Amino acid sequence: MTDTPTLLARRDIADSLLMEGRLDEALVILTDEILPHFTETGEAREKAITQGRIADVLFAQGRLDDAMALHTERLPAVTELGDDEGIAHVLFSMANIRLARGEHESGNLQQIYEELAQAFQLSCQHGQPDAIGGIGMLLVQVLAMGGLRDDAMDTLNVVEEAFTTLRDVDSLARVRELRGMLEG
């Protein structure tokens, strides 16, 4: 049996493969090596993290229903662990999948908003500027879709602060662009 540190290193390799676009290779490592170990050993936190990585690969492959099922399965685990960062990631991911499936056009904009708003709130409570920025940008767009321009602008101000803290020039440019669209 492989030890946990070795498997965590393998998960890092899978993350690198994912960034390189080598999705099938990443998926094999995650599903065949890492997930079975953490399932067998009962390491709930590591299992949930691994499931999240698998769901990210599935999303990138366009397997939206499979990715959603995995996030739905892992949400109770991260909730039970009290892992607010994990909860925020799951809710953001679920909302992102719903948008990709076009659910905002079929009457599900409210659920998407609620998932993003909760994820954004958790990220703000924990002062995570990277999560605030990423989640907030999507939340701003959903608020704008719902006609809540003032709320979108308020959220955009928080997002701008986060990206300023991170010194993320590219994201700040996107914030300015989005602000122009909201004002225009």
Image (cartoon, grey):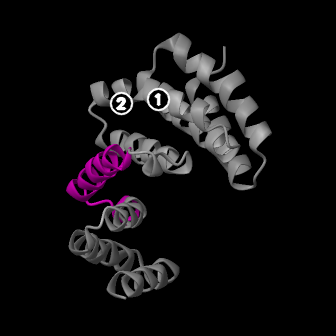
Left or right of 61 in this view: 92: left
Residue sitting at the far front: 106
Left or right of 65 in this view: 152: left
Name the residue: 60% across, 30% down. Answer: 66
Residue 161 location, x and y as percent?
Answer: 29, 77
Name the residue: 35% across, 63% down. Answer: 136
* Mark 2 in CB contact with mark 1 (< 8 angstroms): yes
Q: Nearer the viewer, residue 139 or 146?
A: 146
Residue sitting at the far top: 40
Q: On screen, 116 above or below 32?
A: below
Res 55 → quadrant? top right
Q: Secondary structure at mark 1?
A: helix
- Magenta portion: prevailing SS class: helix
Name the residue: 52% across, 49% down. Answer: 102
Indicate yes or no whether the magenta region holds residue 130. yes
Q: Residue 78 got which mark?
A: 2
Viewport quadrant of the N terminus:
top right
Q: Name the kind of residue labelled 2 in the image.
A: Val
Q: Which residues are magenta?
A: 108-133
Q: Nearer the viewer, residue 6 or 115?
A: 115
Tell me the CA gap for discs 2 and 1: 7 Å
Q: Residue 48 got which mark?
A: 1
What is the crowding at mark 2: few (fewer than 14 residues within 10 Å), some, or many (at least 20)? many
Residue 3 location, x and y as percent?
Answer: 60, 22
Q: On screen, 3 above or below 49?
A: above
Residue 44 location, x and y as percent?
Answer: 42, 22
Q: Residue 75 got which mark?
A: none
Q: Name the kind of residue labelled 1 in the image.
A: Ala
Q: On screen, 175 above or below 83?
A: below
Q: Secondary structure at mark 2?
A: helix
Res 175 → quadrant? bottom left
Indicate yes or no whether the magenta region holds residue 140. no
